[in-house]
Image (spheres, rainbow, N blue to C red):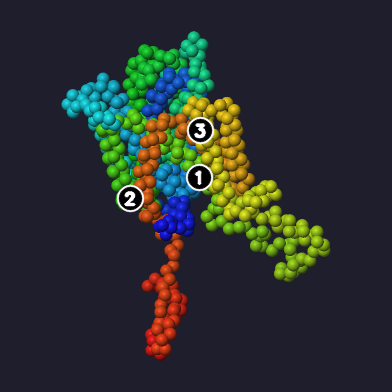
Amino acid sequence: MARWLPRSTDLTRFCQKLNRVKTLEDDMMETSFNRCLSTIDLTLLGIGGMVGSGLYVLTGTVAKEIAGPAVIVSFIIAGFASLLAALCYAEFGARVPKTGSAYMFTYVSVGEIWAFLIGWNVLLEYMIGGAAVARAWSGYLDSIFNHKIKNFTETHVGAWQVPFLARYPDFLAAAILLVATAFISFGAKVSSWLNHVFSAISMGVILFILIMGFVLAQPKNWSTQEGGFAPYGLSGIMAGTATCFYAFVGFDVIAASSEEARNPQRAVPRAIAFSLGLATGAYILVSVVLTLMVPWHTLDPDSALADAFYRRGYAWAGFLVAAGSICAMNTVLLSNLFSLPRIVYAMAEDGLFFQVFSRVHPRTQVPVVGIVVFGLLMALLALIFDLEALVQFLSIGTLLAYTFVAASIIVLRFQQQKGDVPAPAASGRPNPELHEGPSEGELKEYESFSDKLQLVDRDKSKEQREPGQLKAAFEPYLEFLRDFFPGEVVTVAVVTLMVSAICLCSILVFGNTHLHLPTWSYSLLLVLFSLGFLLSLLLIWAHEQQHSTQTFQIPLVPLSPALSIILNIYLMLKLSYMTWLRFAVWLLLGLLVYFGYGIWHSKENLREPRPQRVSARYVVFPGGSLEERVQAVQPSSQPATGLPDTDTDDCKR
């Protein structure tokens, strides 16, 4: 029975396969894509991904049902929380200018299986997100024409009463996705130009809303007679923050497009900062004018802006708002269809997904197979499936990607850079302190032992420590950590930090409601897990990190990524159990794909050293003695370098 159990060496090798990281090329600017996108192109792509239907629907919903006029504060906090994740993406996008976004960032720093699962979840996130926006686009356009499209479809095609299927097939949503797929397949420049047109119209409408809104503003709508500025208190503001956070999830399209940027080291960080700043400003200002135009408790959650103008006597403005909303949703559709095939391409190019999706069209220089296949799948989802139950799935995939990217930043920052060598203790040029007289090879003679000691101390101070090594100031207190390889302790500390964050957030979310913990145990567990989180953070900080490079770096590492990690985990635990159940099922499907295909076809397999086979050759001599000659089996193209092949001569003797 024991012989069927795996050996420890096999288990070790298997775990190493799961956690192997991607080897980057020496020239990361080399690509089969067309590097044609400027900073403005990337910025507008990011704005298009963030400022969508949420600006026209989410602001009114949160203001009326969750936070009141304090939705402004909710958007400010949500914008800051998104900034922590966006800065992590900005650093990675500048340092690793390759397509793939969170998948690629996780692969180069954490490990293969984690990268695959991130990519697998982002894949579904984009498909559901694009299909949901297409159905919202269809419904919004249908409402302008008094639902004539819906009534015609139900009359002539019929209505369904099947679980998980929509009530009627939405041909309009499927058609807009197919049209968008066709435009995306023409190349990055065409996609960018189309996004410019829709973004310009959308921003023009937003500017009109702000100007007219401030003209029609009535400060009394924030007065105590109308319920005050924060009628739901701090709990309402924080609940609104959790909802508003998902309005900013579109900035990762910039990181996914970094392989098509002309100068990604500068363009990606700037585009992320500009787009996030403009999107946050738009959400805040629109929330201000919306809650000042009409009392917050009278808002229509489905069409708050159009209804607000209608009630103030400007019904014609409702058509402009509708046009802006449709253009904004078009930009979100383009953003989803632009990013999804590129992430699939990155996975296929690494061998973790089916190789057919790594094909790039020679003329348009885009992954046309991925664009067409996933565009059709997205159209099928929008046509027949009920997406309302699946929309919450978008949140968990995004938050998980944010969490792993933040952890990857910490791991990567405390690793040695490619090609790093220990800095020499002294310069290669002649040092006048070490030489005396005309002969440079002659050492200076020191008069006393104290002179020699000063020289040794001076050389030690010049020695530069490698990233991942313990800082000199902490060596007397943490001397037992000096025996570890650089970066090893940091990796363990990052895992401990994430486990502590999960436990801490679980106590905060479920301690009083589901677990019904007594006050003393609730407080004790909070203190213990908070200490574990802080001690892990301090242990990471006690190590040397990479010195400033020519590309953008997120400030306050490891504090900034750690705050992003704990915030993302908290928001994930606030999601419903059905979302987690669907997430678990999708993860299982992903593991089947990985262990059935990805792990065997991974390109990192080709880089792993192969064990050398050994063959034994027995030669029989006339005297009856037996001699064994052992030599390594060499490839046919290389001559054997072991023992000489003297079998023929031996047999002749």
Helix, strand or loop at disc 1?
helix
| Residue at 39 percent of width and 33 percent of height | 579
Residue 385, how many percent across, how many down?
Answer: 28, 32
Q: Is tag 1's residue or tag 3's residue first in the polypeptide sequence?
A: 1
Residue bearing the label numbered 1:
408
Mark 2 burial class by Cα count in 10 Å: few <14, some 14-19, many 20+? some
**Quarter of image, res 128:** top left
Judge left or right: residue 613 versus residue 172. Answer: right
- The number of callouts visible is 3
| Residue at 80 percent of width and 59 percent of height | 450
Q: Is residue 522 above or below residue 644?
A: above
Residue 365 appears in the rendering: no
| Residue at 71 percent of width and 68 percent of height | 440
Q: Amino acid at mark 1?
A: Ser
- From this viewpoint, which residue is outermost toward the bottom? 653
- From this viewpoint, which residue is outermost toward the top? 225
Q: Amino acid at mark 2?
A: Phe
Residue bearing the label numbered 2:
354
Q: Is residue 335 above or below residue 322?
A: below
Of residues 498 and 617, the one drawn nearer to the viewer in this rendering: 617
